[in-house]
Image: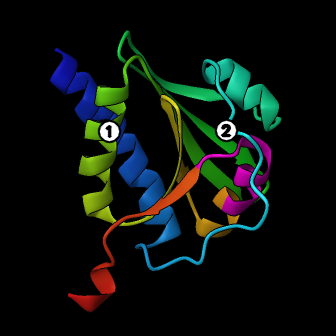
Amino acid sequence: MRLTRAKSALAGAVAVLALTGCGAGTDGAGDVPETATGNLEQLAAEVKCEPNMQTDADQIRQAICAKGDEKYVLVTFATDRGQREWINTAKDYGGYYLVGRKWVAVGHEDTLTTLQGRLGGAMEVGLNHADH
């Protein structure tokens, strides 16, 4: 059952990636605050998002956040290992990932750079499919 939930969450993130395009290199952000911690609702409140819950399971929680034309997925995990496994699989689809402790935001590079200014975290980039 866990695998099905993880696949469902991954499918949601992939849908957002389809809206934002494939990944490419990034130079990173300027001044990054200390990485935020908390549950999905706390992180969403920090960035003034009313989360539209997509997955609410024991191991993974996922919501879509939207402000105007900006859309991103906010995902929280029960364990560090579950988070890393999810990221490693998701990065095969390209895109940009803002990664904190037991949370990930997935979306367009510009949107995540803005989020990074509020949540901290480290930017990770998925595979660049333009070269294939």
Give the main secondary structure, helix, strand or loop, of the magenta stretch.
Answer: helix
Residue 105 sits in which quadrant? top right
Mark 2: few/some/many CA within 10 Å (<14, 14-19, 20+): some
The foreground one among 9 and 43 is 43
Residue carrying label 1: 84
Please indicate, yes or no, whether residue 50 appears anywhere in the rendered image: no
- As drawn, the label of residue 35 is 2
Quarter in which the N terminus is drawn: top left
- Measured along the vertical axis of the image, is residue 76 above or below residue 69? above
Which percent across, then down, holds residue 82?
30, 28
Q: Image height check: is 102 above or below 28?
A: above
- Secondary structure, mark 1, is helix
User: Residue 101 placed where, x, y %?
Assistant: 52, 32
Q: Is residue 129 left or right of residue 57?
A: left
Residue in the picture at 62% in, 70% down: 28
Residue 20 rendering spot, x and y as whole percentages: 52, 67
Q: Position of residue 110 (x, y in %)?
A: 68, 68
Q: Residue at x 56, y 53 (%)?
A: 122
Give the Cα distance between marks 2 and 1: 17 Å
Residue positioned most to the bottom: 131
Amino acid under disc 1: Arg
Q: How is the image coloured?
A: rainbow
Q: Amino acid at mark 2?
A: Thr
Kindly check if marks 2 and 1 are in contact, taking CB atoms under 8 A apart as contact. Answer: no
Q: Is residue 116 magenta?
A: yes
Residue range of the region highlighted in magenta in the rendering: 113-121
Give the secondary structure at mark 2.
loop
Q: Is residue 9 above or below residue 99?
A: above
